[in-house]
Amino acid sequence: MNAVVSDWNALSDAEFVARYRELFEHSPWVVERAATQRPFDDLLAGLMAPLLTATPAEQVALVRAHPELAGKAAVDGTLTAASAAEQASAGLDRLTPEEYTRFHALNHAYRHRYGFPFVICVRLTDKAGILAAMERRLDNGRNAEIATAIEQIGHIVRLRLETMP
């Protein structure tokens, strides 16, 4: 990570939350809980700990806070800056009409099956990999998908941390 151990542990709770609150999509509660559990040696593990011990309803709420890939928020420009950059890095801002139709259909099928959007760390794959994962993961059970989404959120947070100033 970009900071030494003492940096994040030396911050006040308010400073810690202000610095890291945007890491979890529309879910500052994760960072607020992590702030009260310091000190910790590993920033990513410390930030993820509250999520791993959260109730199933809280975990699903965090997953639901993520936008659909190439979905309505991407089209109307209401993605967070981080999500917009991440989706663009995988080429999701440059879909052909056929690709857009396929993403839309898979997003719909996924949300209908699980009740939350498909979450994947798009910076670790590309359009073809995302589409293949969407199709493959439609066969999973709901609990497996929640666990996979949480794991993917961990990858997203790790990469966001690595690019923080």
Image (cartoon, rainbow, N blue to C red):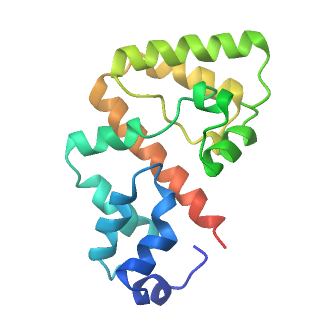
Judge by depth and name the residue closer to the eye, 50 or 29.
29
Question: On the rendered structure, is 125 left or right of 9?
Answer: right
Q: Is residue 41 above or below residue 86?
A: below
What residue is drawn where x is 33% and y is 58%? 29
Q: Is residue 75 above or below residue 46?
A: above
Which residue reaches farthest left?
A: 55
Residue 113 visible in image:
yes
Image quadrant holding the N terminus, namely bottom right
Q: Which x, y percent locates residue 6?
A: 46, 89
Q: Which x, y percent locates residue 65?
A: 42, 40
What residue is drawn where x is 31% and y is 38%? 60
Q: Which x, y percent locates residue 13?
A: 35, 79
Q: Quadrant of residue 39?
A: bottom left
Q: Quadrant of residue 17?
A: bottom left
Q: Quadrant of residue 61?
A: top left
What residue is drawn where x is 42% and y is 45%? 151
Residue 42 visible in image:
no
Q: Is residue 164 above or below residue 70?
A: below
Q: Which x, y percent locates residue 45?
A: 39, 66
Question: On the rendered structure, is 76 left or right of 43?
Answer: right
What residue is drawn where x is 34% and y is 21%? 114
Image quadrant holding the C terminus, namely bottom right
Question: On the rendered structure, is 120 left or right of 117?
Answer: right
Judge by depth and name the residue closer to the eye, 100 or 39.
100
